[in-house]
Image (cartoon, rainbow, N blue to C red):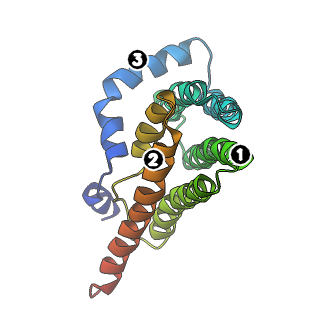
Amino acid sequence: MEKTAEKLKTKTFTDYMRIWFKGVLDPIGAFFNRIGVTPNMMTMLGLLGNMVGAWFLAKGNMPLGGLFMLICTPFDALDGTMARLRGEANEFGAFVDSVTDRYSELFILGGLLYWFTTNNDHISTVVVYAAAAGSVLVSYVKARADSLKFDANVGILTRMERYLVIAPLLLLNLPIYAIWIVAILANITALQRFWKVRQQARKPA
């Protein structure tokens, strides 16, 4: 019964990206496995790379910060692929992966927050806060829904979409566009997930 429910579970754009790029990720993951890189090392490399990117953002170097984000965030997909190929995929690994994902994203937004604050751009500072809040709530609503056996796997701006918005716009030195898009659409996504859970909760048992 649980397997059937899992098959019927709604897929997000992030889920489809993993499926579409499986043929690319598997050979790359296999290569890193062969040279001795472990999934946990890949996870930490992604986190550290985003921390470096956040540092450049805090200094106002948006293109370089965006480049680090663009290169290092995909490590999130590789660590899971590597663990699967090694036969080491487990729930704790997925848990660690999710936690480091949140830290990576918050480091990036934290770098932007620092930059706008030191430049006395109060409006953008508030918008970055709203973007961070929305990003966290998107993940929290899903995690809480999953714990209660609801499906909240919907929304217009899940993590992959946020990455595809923020990284390219930072590369183009357009951070204000990035934070406004995420601030608005991430919070809409959180509300979409809330509403989906609400609909399921109202259905008769």
Mark on residue 64? none
Counting residues from the N terminus, which is met first, the one under dot 3 or under dot 2? 3
Looking at the rendering, which quadrant does residue 129 occupy?
bottom right
| Residue ID for mark 2 | 159
Residue at the (55%, 26%) spot, across then down: 63
Mark on residue 114? 1
Q: Are marks 3 and 2 in contact (CB under 8 Å)?
A: no
| Amino acid type for the residue under numbered disc 1 | Tyr
Q: CA distance from mark 3 to mark 2?
A: 24 Å
Q: Position of residue 172 (x, y in %)?
A: 46, 28
Residue at the (74%, 45%) spot, across then down: 118
Q: Position of residue 180 (x, y in %)?
A: 47, 52
Provide the secondary structure element on which disc 3 rests: helix
Q: CA distance from mark 3 to mark 1?
A: 39 Å
Q: Position of residue 138 (x, y in %)?
A: 48, 60
| Residue ID for mark 3 | 27
Q: State left or right for residue 92 relative to residue 82.
A: right
Q: Are marks 2 and 1 in contact (CB under 8 Å)?
A: no
The N terminus appears in which quarter of the rendering?
bottom left
The crowd level at tag 2 (other Cα within 10 Å; few <14, some 14-19, many 20+) is: some
Q: State left or right for residue 13 relative to residue 88.
A: left
Q: State left or right for residue 90 relative to residue 15.
A: right
| Amino acid type for the residue under numbered disc 3 | Pro
| Amino acid type for the residue under numbered disc 2 | Arg
Observer-nearest of 76 and 61 = 61
